[in-house]
């Protein structure tokens, strides 16, 4: 899982980098072997060391266990310049697409300017095995890396929600049981056992809202049936869309934090109240908003990682604007008879082109 709030990098590994462009910030992450994670940047990107945070989840419990999940497909979907959508076929047909989440693990755009809508995308399933991907705008080629996971265990519940085109700075996304985010209403049993496993955003099709404040809102579960979103003031009133995939498990404990730190480098958030005892069983999710009507990227790009049982580190490349992060710390479920059935690892990587 890409732990950057925009499914790319968070900019140069040296804080206060100036003027990164779309191809510089492009990044895709893929698990290519049991011991190998491959990071892909564009050859046209800035020849500097860029930064990514990541997590890898592995289910090692008994087949068919109540907390089991299975990777059904790894897809690389290219949406060529002039187009906004494309589809792919999953390599393995899921038993139930409604219990699947298509995780976006990276987005690249060949655009060499500040056209950041090309680094926004939505992913959802339809039919029995069709992956749908839609990106913002239509300039340059956009490549989206997606890993589709089916949460087969009986303890997992999955909700999906999609907005129509919207222009407001704030609003809500209603959850549904169906993979395409419509039709059958979905209600969480307890929001403290649920996470926004994949918070996806697509900028407008005309490609004019690509300032700092335009690309990606903060999102949080606001009720048993809805996820709320919020942009900073200065967000252009142009068409946007959101797709959320929410994951619930009665054995998963979720604690939420809001942080307004804006220093360059690591911003440390005290997560003591989450009660973390084992980092190999704990995940972090985050979204961030940043003010600013200009395109001084990578301002607004941020990495999220756990550094100890009591601290989360939010790595911010640039300071100077009004920011806000929403963070979810999730202690994963464990079967009493198989206490290590779900293992999480995570780290930071820096790399050049």
Image (cartoon, rainbow, N blue to C red):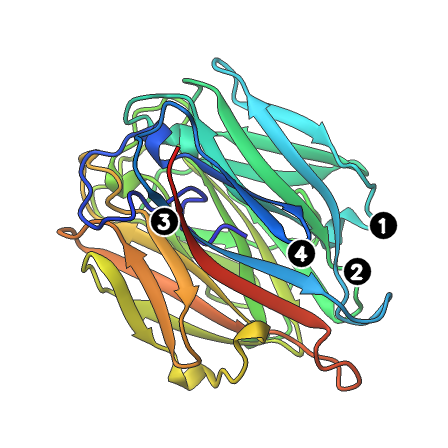
Indicate the quadrant where residue 271 lies. bottom left
Q: Marks 2 and 1: CB-CB under 8 Å?
A: yes
Q: Earlier in the sequence, mark 3 or mark 2?
A: 2
Q: Which residue is mark 1?
A: 95
Of badges 4 and 3, nearer the viewer stands 3
Alpha carbon distance from label 4 to label 3:
24 Å
Q: Which residue is mark 2?
A: 152
Of badges 3 and 2, nearer the viewer stands 2
Q: How many marks?
A: 4
**Residue at 42%, 22% in the rendered image:** 110
Q: Earlier in the sequence, mark 4 or mark 3?
A: 4
Q: Marks 4 and 2: CB-CB under 8 Å?
A: no
Side of 96 relative to 86 (left or right) = right
Indicate the quadrant where residue 104 lies. top right
Alpha carbon distance from label 4 to label 2:
20 Å
Side of 79 relative to 292 (left or right) = right
Q: Which mark is residue 185?
A: 4
**Residue at 55%, 22% in the rendered image:** 79
Q: Earlier in the sequence, mark 1 or mark 3?
A: 1
Neighbour tally class for label 1: few under 14, some 14-19, many 20 plus, Cα within 10 Å: some
């Amino acid at each position: 899982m890409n732990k950057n709030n925009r499914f790319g990098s968070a900019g140069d590994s040296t804080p206060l980098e100036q003027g990164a462009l779309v191809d510089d910030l492009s990044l895709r992450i893929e698990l290519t072997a049991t011991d190998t994670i491959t990071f892909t940047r564009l050859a046209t990107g800035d020849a500097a060391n860029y930064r990514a945070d990541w997590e890898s989840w592995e289910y090692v419990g008994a087949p068919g266990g109540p907390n089991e999940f299975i990777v059904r497909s790894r897809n690389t979907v290219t949406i060529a310049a002039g187009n906004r959508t494309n589809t792919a076929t999953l390599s393995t047909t899921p038993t139930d697409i409604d219990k699947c989440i298509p995780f976006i693990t990276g987005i690249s755009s060949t655009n060499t300017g500040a056209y950041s809508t090309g680094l926004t995308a939505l992913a959802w399933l339809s039919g029995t095995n069709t992956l749908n991907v839609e990106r913002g705008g239509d300039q340059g080629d956009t490549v989206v890396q997606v890993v589709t996971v089916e949460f087969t265990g009986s303890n997992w519940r999955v909700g999906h929600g999609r907005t129509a085109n919207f222009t407001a700075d704030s609003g809500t996304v209603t959850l549904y049981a169906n993979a395409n985010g419509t039709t059958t209403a979905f209600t969480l049993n307890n929001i403290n056992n649920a996470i926004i496993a994949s918070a996806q955003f697509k900028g407008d099709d005309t490609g004019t809202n690509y300032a700092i404040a335009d690309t990606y809102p903060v999102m949080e579960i606001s009720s048993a049936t809805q996820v709320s979103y919020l942009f900073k003031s200065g967000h252009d009133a142009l068409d946007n869309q959101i797709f959320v995939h929410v994951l619930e498990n009665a054995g998963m404990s979720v604690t939420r934090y809001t942080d307004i730190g804006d220093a360059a480098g690591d911003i440390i958030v005290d997560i003591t109240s989450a009660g973390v005892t084992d980092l190999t069983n704990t995940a972090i999710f985050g979204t961030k908003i940043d003010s600013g009507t200009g395109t001084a990227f990578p301002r607004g790009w941020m990495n999220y990682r756990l550094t100890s049982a009591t601290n989360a580190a939010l790595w911010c490349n640039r300071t100077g604007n009004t920011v806000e992060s929403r963070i979810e710390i999730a202690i994963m479920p464990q079967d009493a008879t198989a206490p290590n059935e779900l293992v999480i690892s995570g780290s930071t990587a820096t790399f050049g082109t």
